[in-house]
Amino acid sequence: MELLIDFFQNTGFGMADYRNFVMIGVGLVFLYLGIAKHYEPLLLVPIGFGILVGNIPVFKGLGLGIYEEGSVLNYLYFGVSKGIYPPLIFLGIGAMTDFSTLLARPKLILLGAAAQLGVFMTFLGALFLGFVPTEAASIGIIGGADGPTAIFLSAKLAPHLVGPIAIAAYSYMALVPVIQPPIMRLLTSREERLIKMSDPREVSTQEKILFPIVGFLFCCFLAPAALPLLGMLFFGNLLKECMVTDRLARTARTAVVDTVTIVLGLTVGASTQADVFLTGKSIGIFILGACSFMVATAGGVIFAKLMNLLSSDKINPLLGAAGVSAVPDSARVVQMVGNAEDPSNYLLMHAMAPNVAGVIGSAIAAGVLWSFVG
């Protein structure tokens, strides 16, 4: 009987407390949303399974836990804690992204900038609630709806909050189709949602090649701290557009980004070890993250309405919601909401302009915050 008791005490069942089971429940919810509901499965499935991995109770000192130096998981987590994985993700995003719609109608860049309102408003709100500046900046960037950027900035400024910030950022990215439509409908009239966009002009190959070079120089001179993210983003896009590095571009947008996404998602999920993750700060981060995302969506829509007051060339205000950098989900939501009003209204192509501008905008916002509070 003593042997049986000793055996039981040495199993995960014997070492677990209620917090482990709470987090395992969260992991199962992520898996359900990713598999059954198809909410960002490429992100939620690795993160959800990572949460399960991180909440199996293990003996301390055996080199098994993600926070134990020398463990396999700790070595894999090194890419998160040192900000290595996010720039590699940006390399793949750049190699996938077509900036043609943005180049065809440059004024839509302003919508990507306006959506960053959520970042800075949440930064101020977090300061008001007692978070130190480095923590507040890391929480605020959740409003950009850009998981890699949130991980990169929090790894630099508040490494102890990487887990909850990453989970919050990816959760809200996955819930874009749930969170954004009510805000979009609330802030626009039916007449505004029915506005049809004129066809964009044709963008030349020369413009597409010059844009990543000129864009990189301008953005990184503006916010030098954004260099690791924007450098890789524009480099990936140059590989795609210059037409002579197809193999490199294909590798960047497939093998590289897929591999990094797997490891990043798994290790971020595993970092939600119950005794580290379940704190009052984590709850506060989730609440502030939700507010940040909603303010960012509202900021983009309201700014689009203001642009219409000052211009005769009207744009559909729904495009403002795509200013958050959840690519391409926010653009798809714009298409979905506009299409519900008028099935012949196709906004997806136009929404990609502020959507990709939001990617650039969130990276610049992260660079600005890092330079101010780092």
Image (cartoon, rainbow, N blue to C red):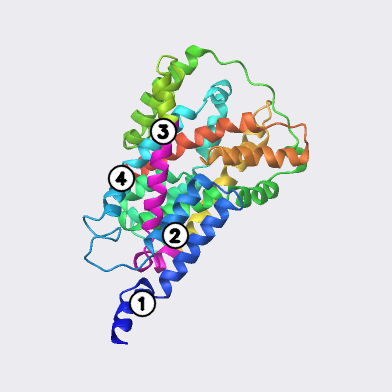
Q: Are marks 4 and 3 in contact (CB under 8 Å)?
A: no
Q: Rate crowding at label 4 as few (under 14), some (14 to 19) or many (20 or more) other CA atoms within 10 Å.
A: some
Q: Are marks 4 and 1 in contact (CB under 8 Å)?
A: no
Q: Nearer the viewer, mark 4 or mark 2?
A: 4
Dot placed on the residue nearer the N-terminal end, 4 or 3? 4
Q: Position of residue 26 (x, y in %)?
A: 49, 63
Q: Are marks 3 and 1 in contact (CB under 8 Å)?
A: no
Left or right: 229 in relation to 24 = left
Q: Main secondary structure of the magenta part?
A: helix
Dot placed on the residue nearer the N-terminal end, 4 or 2? 4
Q: Are marks 3 and 2 in contact (CB under 8 Å)?
A: no
- Residue pointed to by mark 3: 255
Q: What type is the residue that disc 4 sits on?
A: Gly
> In the figure, 182 relative to 282: above or below?
above
Q: Are marks 1 and 2 in contact (CB under 8 Å)?
A: no
Left or right: 272 in relation to 2 = right
Numbered disc 1: secondary structure: helix
The numbered mark at residue 14 is 1
Q: What type is the residue that disc 2 sits on?
A: Ile
- Residue pointed to by mark 2: 285
Please name the residue shown 41% across and 28% down the image. Answer: 251
Q: Rate crowding at label 3 as few (under 14), some (14 to 19) or many (20 or more) other CA atoms within 10 Å.
A: few
Q: Position of residue 167 (x, y in %)?
A: 45, 55
Q: What type is the residue that disc 1 sits on?
A: Gly
State which quarter of the image contains the N terminus. bottom left
Dot placed on the residue nearer the N-terminal end, 3 or 2? 3
**Looking at the rendering, which quadrant does residue 53 occupy?**
bottom left
Q: Nearer the viewer, mark 4 or mark 3?
A: 3
The numbered mark at residue 302 is none
Left or right: 80 in relation to 119 = left
